[in-house]
């Protein structure tokens, strides 16, 4: 079955960097639209970044544009979110989402990984 496992979260100081990973199983990340969302305490879950299955098209929320980069390693079946110049307001639980277009079609979520930006 489809499974998404996030890792790489943690505590970092403002201005620091983290790289989140989303390891997928049960489908190929090249056959899906892969996204990162985040949810801060008491707030709604918002889209942060998205990469289309072809890999040629990406989308970023205005709040992270120029600081975050989404990428995909098809050989490792993993999607990454490189986060640079982190701000306190980036603190949230980050979730990986897969919209699988072939095979096990559907929308799937990982369990989330906590990112805390604090001095």
Image (tube, rainbow, N blue to C red):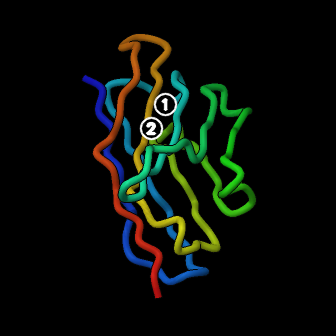
C-alpha separation, residue under disc 2 versus residue under disc 1: 6 Å
Describe residue 117's horizontal placement relative to residue 64 as left or right.
left
At 44% from the left edge and 38% from the top edge, which residue is drawn?
77
At 40% from the left edge and 23% from the top edge, which residue is drawn?
107
Say which quarter of the image contains residue 30: top right
Say which quarter of the image contains residue 64: bottom right
Q: Residue furthest front?
A: 42
Describe residue 88's horizontal placement relative to residue 4 as left or right.
right
Q: Earlier in the sequence, mark 2 or mark 1?
A: 1
**Element carrying mark 2:** loop
Say which quarter of the image contains residue 16: bottom right
At 46% from the left edge and 50% from the top edge, which residue is drawn?
38
Q: Which mark is residue 29?
A: 1
**Element carrying mark 1:** helix
Q: Residue 14: where, in percent of width, then height? A: 56, 81
Crowding around mark 2 (Cα neighbors within 10 Å: few <14, some 14 to 19, many 20+) is: some
Q: Residue 74: where, in percent of width, then height? A: 52, 36
Q: Residue 1 versus residue 88: which sits nearer the camera? A: 88
Q: Residue 33 versus residue 75: which sits nearer the camera? A: 33
Q: Residue furthest bottom?
A: 119
At 36% from the left edge and 28% from the top edge, which residue is drawn?
108
Label tally: 2
Q: Residue 109: where, in percent of width, then height? A: 35, 35
Crowding around mark 1 (Cα neighbors within 10 Å: few <14, some 14 to 19, many 20+) is: many
Q: Which residue is mark 2?
A: 77
Describe residue 3's horizontal placement relative to residue 49 as left or right.
left
Q: Quadrant of the N terminus?
A: top left
Q: Are marks 2 and 1 in contact (CB under 8 Å)?
A: yes
């Amino acid at each position: 079955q489809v499974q998404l496992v996030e890792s790489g979260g943690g505590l970092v100081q403002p201005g620091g960097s983290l790289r989140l990973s989303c390891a997928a199983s049960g489908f190929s990340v090249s056959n899906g639209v892969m996204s990162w969302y985040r949810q801060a305490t008491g707030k709604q879950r918002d889209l942060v970044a998205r990469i289309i299955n072809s890999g040629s098209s990406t989308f970023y929320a205005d709040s992270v544009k120029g600081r975050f980069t989404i990428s995909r390693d098809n050989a490792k079946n993993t999607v990454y979110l490189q986060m640079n110049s982190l701000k306190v307001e980036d603190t949230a639980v980050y979730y990986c989402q897969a919209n699988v277009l072939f095979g096990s079609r559907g929308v799937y979520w990982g369990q989330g990984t906590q990112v805390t930006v604090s001095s």
